[in-house]
Amino acid sequence: MLLAGCSDSPGSLEGAWTANGPVPMTITFRPGETEAMGVIEHVDYKTAGDSVEVTYKDGLMKGTSMKYVLVDRNTATNPMLTLHRVH
């Protein structure tokens, strides 16, 4: 089944993830927002198949979109980092 569209729901990304990349951190995806390093930013989510595009509506990343591809239930990637679900 293919699901696509913009919404407040992070879909398969919902929850806390650790990021391995230039700046290791925990990122939490919640309906309508993300939180990283104590900073909460409002976002829109667009899902298409196994991808979730996160578009930032405010803060330092305002206007920027990051696309995450879910490799499996507990791993997501983009060109800058790999996320692992926090259990």
Image (spheres, rainbow, N blue to C red):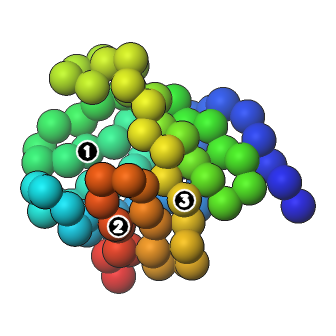
Q: Nearer the viewer, mark 1 or mark 3?
A: 3
Q: Using a 10 Å C-alpha cutoff, classify the residue at mark 1 as few (fewer than 14 neighbours), some (14 to 19) or many (20 or more).
A: some
* Rendered residue at 47%/78% (across/down): 74
Q: Position of residue 25 (x, y in %)?
A: 15, 60
Amino acid type, label 3: Val
Residue of label 3:
69
Q: Earlier in the sequence, mark 1 or mark 2?
A: 1
What is the CA distance from the residue labelled 2 to the residue labelled 3? 10 Å
Q: Is disc 1 placed on a helix, strand or loop?
A: strand
Which residue is under mark 2? Answer: 83
Q: Secondary structure at mark 2?
A: strand
Residue type at numbered disc 2: Leu
Dividing the picture into quarters, in which one does residue 21 lie?
A: bottom left
Residue 54 position, x and y percent, is 47, 38
The answer to whether 23 is drawn above or below residue 47 in the figure is below
Q: Which residue is mark 1?
A: 35
| Tally of numbered discs | 3
Residue at image location 54% in from the left, 59% down from the top: 69
Indicate the amino acid at tag 1. Glu
Report whether residue 31 is seen. Answer: no
